[in-house]
């Protein structure tokens, strides 16, 4: 399971929880403007926007999970099993493999409108990166500093949905997730009034009763509702520290603790990492399951006019700030 969100204060933020039972040795990866992305369709993107994000680098190619480019356009891939359907190559289209989709869009587009133009010509093809890696069944959220869309390649074609809540999780399809919010329109951050029955005296005995019925389990439908409620009602100051702190609190509302989602044997799904990228400043903040201290990589501290990938191993060990030694 995974959850992606946007959050806007003075600056704009994009990030996600990556929930899985294992890790591929992903690193915070900066791809500078002149790194040549050799695509499977024979083309090369040799001059493109620089980007920063989380990627697994294989044979020198950054396999991005989520990233933000120097214009702030951001994108994340989330699991979409049994629904994602990739196609055969088609003439007259941009045939792009799923693992190339993030660089293809972020390399060339400055905002969601420009991404929509590229999406008109795209055909997501049924192509593995290698025999050793699975063909991931994904869907994607693409966000800029004002708008978000969701892209789903399914049996009957490529679907693009407006995403007015700026939240995405996993199955089922995005239109269902949005419709399902109708079931929760009675929830409130305010204390409830008694509308149960006029002749019955009922009492507000606890804070938070306005949101009784907000799902708390870890299924993707429940995480969508929980995150949408938390994010849409979120209040924070607009400084960098207040904004990123609030961002991690929103993601924390749906994080996965080891033990609660059993996958058989001794396997449990956990939140491997949570990320928050400042879309204006190109700073990628993250925490990992073991290390709750926020670590950051600043894209603008690197030479963005280079042609080699820069990568930072995740700081995974817990950092404790002792106050008396
Ligand atoms: C599984 C990850 C998404 C996490 C998620 O949504 N889990 C939910 C599970 S469930 O639905 O609720 O069951 C996805 C996100 C990005 C994916 C990775 C990226 O797409 C990059 C490469 C792409 C290669 O084709 C496969 C390995 C891979 C390294 C992918 C492995 C895996 O599919 C990742 C890590």
Image (tube, rainbow, N blue to C red):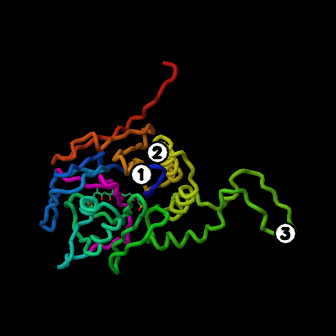
The residue identified by callout 1 is 267
Q: Where is mark 3, residue-wise?
A: 198
Precedes in sequence: disc 1 or disc 3: 3
Locate residue 34 relative to residue 263 in the image: left or right: left
Please tell me which of labels 2 and 1 falls first in the chain: 2
The nearer-to-camera label among 1 and 3 is: 3
Closer mark to the observer between disc 2 and disc 3: 2
Label 2 packing within 10 angstroms: few (<14), some (14-19), many (20+)? many
Residue extent of the magenta highlight = 60-86
Cα separation, mark 2 vs mark 1, equals: 31 Å
Does 242 appear in magenta? no
Above/below status of 120 relative to 271:
below
Q: Where is residue 60 in the image (x, y as percent from the top left)?
A: 17, 50
Q: Which quadrant of the view contains residue 154?
A: bottom left
Residue 201 as seen in the image, left or right of residue 116? right
Side of 173 relative to 202 (left or right): left
Q: What x and y, as percent, mark residue 316?
A: 37, 38
Q: Decide: is 274 above or below 110.
A: above
- 10 to the left or right of 122: right
Mark 3, Cα crowd under 10 Å, few <14 / some 14-19 / many 20+, is few
Q: Mark 2 points at which residue?
A: 244
């Amino acid at each position: 399971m995974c959850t992606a969100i946007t959050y806007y204060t003075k600056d704009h933020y994009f990030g996600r929880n990556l929930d899985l039972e294992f890790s591929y040795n992903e690193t915070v990866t900066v791809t500078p403007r002149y790194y040549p992305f050799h695509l499977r369709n024979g083309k090369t993107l040799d001059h493109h926007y620089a980007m920063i994000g989380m990627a697994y680098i294989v044979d020198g190619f950054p396999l991005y999970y989520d990233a933000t480019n120097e214009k702030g356009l951001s994108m994340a891939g989330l699991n979409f099993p049994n629904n994602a359907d990739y196609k055969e190559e088609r003439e007259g289209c941009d045939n792009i493999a799923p693992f190339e989709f993030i660089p293809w869009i972020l390399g060339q587009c400055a905002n969601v409108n420009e991404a929509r133009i590229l999406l008109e010509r795209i055909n997501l093809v049924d192509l593995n990166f290698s025999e050793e890696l699975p063909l991931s069944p994904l869907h994607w959220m693409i966000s800029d500093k004002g708008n978000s869309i969701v892209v789903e390649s399914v049996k009957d074609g490529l679907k693009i949905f407006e995403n007015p809540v700026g939240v995405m999780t996993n199955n089922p399809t995005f239109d269902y997730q949005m419709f399902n919010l109708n079931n929760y329109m009675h929830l409130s951050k305010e204390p409830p009034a008694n509308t149960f029955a006029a002749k019955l005296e009922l009492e507000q005995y606890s804070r938070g009763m306005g949101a009784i019925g907000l799902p708390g389990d870890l299924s993707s439908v429940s995480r969508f509702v929980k995150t949408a409620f938390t994010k849409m009602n979120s209040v924070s100051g607009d400084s960098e520290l207040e904004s990123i702190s609030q961002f991690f609190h929103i993601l924390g509302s749906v994080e996965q603790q080891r033990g609660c989602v059993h996958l058989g044997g001794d396997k449990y799904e956990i939140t491997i990492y949570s990320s928050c990228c400042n879309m204006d400043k190109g700073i990628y903040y993250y925490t990992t399951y073991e290390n709750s201290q926020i670590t950051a990589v600043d894209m603008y501290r690197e030479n963005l006019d280079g042609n080699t990938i820069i990568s930072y191993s995740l700081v995974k060990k817990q950092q404790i700030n002792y106050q008396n030694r």
